[in-house]
């Protein structure tokens, strides 16, 4: 039977085709029903600024599907093809939020064996000097060159080295420093300072007419006069400082910080020493409210200007209501004046561009007055409990180190407790 006449289907053929098409089953879109908790999690991901873009698109597809949109409508809304919408709709219906993650891909076969990975990590965990390389620490490119030189691999890139080390959380190009506890009375001295910050002395609360002063010296503040004027910031341009400079000398800034009232008293001197420090004490103790105070506690470190019992006696002889309290050796971080000095360094000294020492001094004193107008006490959070936890961790570490030492090492020095 002829079914096409002049390029046109006959009526009977069209009828047969319509009946056949009507009997073909139509795939229905999977229905997505979200619980309240699932909806909150999906919305948080849908508007996240840190989640991967592909995950955000998949989450929004699921939210649209739960909102009753058809696959075609979702595809238009999200700028994707219908097959993409159908894929992630079905995966979420089958596996929930885990279904929106990328499935494992085998990728290309590894170029380096597990043994080579282990040898590269072992090389990174050693010091360069141990292999005869004249370096203080490894970089990824130096490790790549050494791995080839030592015969671990025939060729490897620095990027591959970084990936191998990243999988093991190794960063041999970084370092941290520490210091051993030298003060045998570290715990007792640190506890006294921390108690004063909590307004406690010898187990008794301080009175309203008792004050805590934190004091120290910031040495060698240089007057560097740049050879060319400093360029001010502009559109898409940061402030620019000329590298060349003329030296105009250096001075020291001595300061006393009232811990609980956030007031600073300071002065500048050509150098540090007993005389400049006592001049600072004189300036503080001859002004109110410290002159008539019951007691004024001076928290200082172990610098030469105020070290030992002699400095305590000198201070008490000049001002009977003054009590000097020393921080432990190598524990200047317990002295709150160091926080103020860090502010001075960031806001006043750096970048250093001064024409003379007089300009440095004027700037420091002017900043001191400005700071006192708006300052609030520092939120000191390191307490006695934190100190006890720290010392307990150090003790456990010391015991582990001793237990791991090989026998017969009588000539090795005993492990000391590291400072915080």
Image (tube, grey):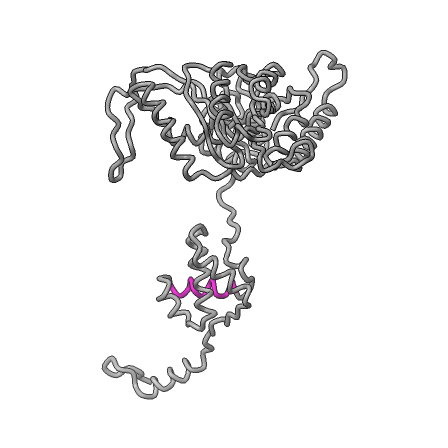
| Magenta: main secondary structure | helix
Image coordinates of residue 282 in percent, x first then y, are: 49, 21
Query: Does residue 321 show up magenta in the picture?
Result: no
Where is residue 371 drawn, in percent x and y?
41, 35
Q: Nearer the viewer, residue 163 or 137?
A: 137
- Give the magenta part as a residue range: 81-92
Residue in view at x 45 percent, y 19 percent: 219
Pick out the residue farthest to the front: 292
Residue 331 vs residue 315, the one in the foreground = 315
- Residue 211: horizontal and vertical position, in percent? 56, 32
Question: Does 82 appear in magenta?
Answer: yes
Q: Is residue 128 left or right of residue 391?
A: left
Q: Quadrant of the C terminus?
A: top right
Q: Is residue 244 left or right of residue 71?
A: left
Q: Is residue 118 above or below residue 62?
A: above
Which residue appears at 59% of the width and 17% of the height?
317
> Between residues 105 and 209, which one lies in front from this camera angle?
209
């Amino acid at each position: 039977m002829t079914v096409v006449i002049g390029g046109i289907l006959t009526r009977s053929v069209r009828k047969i085709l319509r009946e056949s098409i009507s009997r073909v089953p139509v795939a229905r879109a999977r229905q997505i029903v979200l619980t309240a908790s699932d909806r909150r999690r999906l919305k948080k991901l849908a508007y996240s600024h840190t989640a991967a873009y592909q995950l955000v698109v998949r989450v929004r597809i699921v939210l649209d599907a739960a909102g009753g949109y058809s696959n075609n409508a979702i595809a238009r809304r999200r700028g994707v093809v219908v097959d993409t919408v159908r894929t992630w709709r079905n995966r979420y219906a089958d596996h929930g939020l885990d279904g929106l993650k990328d499935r494992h891909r085998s990728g290309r076969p590894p170029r380096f064996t597990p043994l080579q990975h282990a040898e590269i990590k072992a090389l990174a965990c050693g010091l360069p000097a141990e292999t005869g390389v004249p370096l203080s620490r490894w970089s990824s490119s130096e490790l790549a060159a050494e791995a080839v030189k030592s015969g671990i691999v025939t060729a490897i890139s620095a990027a591959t080295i970084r990936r191998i080390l990243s999988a093991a959380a190794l960063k041999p190009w970084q370092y941290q420093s520490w210091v051993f506890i030298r003060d045998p009375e570290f715990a007792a001295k640190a506890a006294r300072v921390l108690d004063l910050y909590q307004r406690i002395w010898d187990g008794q609360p301080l009175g309203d007419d008792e004050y805590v002063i934190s004091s120290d010296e910031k040495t060698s503040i240089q007057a560097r006069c740049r050879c060319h004027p400093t360029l001010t910031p502009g559109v898409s341009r940061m402030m620019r400082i000329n590298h060349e400079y003329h030296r105009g000398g250096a001075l020291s800034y001595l300061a006393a910080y009232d811990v609980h009232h956030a007031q600073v008293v300071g002065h500048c001197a050509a150098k540090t020493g007993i005389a400049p420090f006592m001049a600072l004490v004189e300036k503080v103790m001859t002004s109110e409210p410290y002159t008539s105070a019951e007691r004024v506690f001076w928290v200082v470190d172990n610098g030469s200007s105020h070290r030992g019992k002699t400095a305590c006696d000198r201070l008490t002889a000049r001002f009977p209501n003054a009590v000097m309290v020393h921080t432990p050796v190598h524990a200047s971080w317990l002295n709150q004046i160091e926080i103020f000095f860090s502010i001075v360094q960031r806001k006043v000294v750096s970048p250093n561009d001064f024409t003379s020492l007089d300009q440095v001094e004027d700037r420091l004193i002017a900043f001191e007055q400005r700071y006192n107008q708006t300052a609030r006490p520092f939120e000191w959070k390191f307490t006695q409990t934190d100190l006890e936890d720290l010392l307990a961790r150090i003790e456990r570490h010391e015991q582990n180190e001793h237990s791991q030492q090989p026998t017969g090492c009588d000539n090795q020095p005993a492990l000391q407790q590291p400072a915080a």
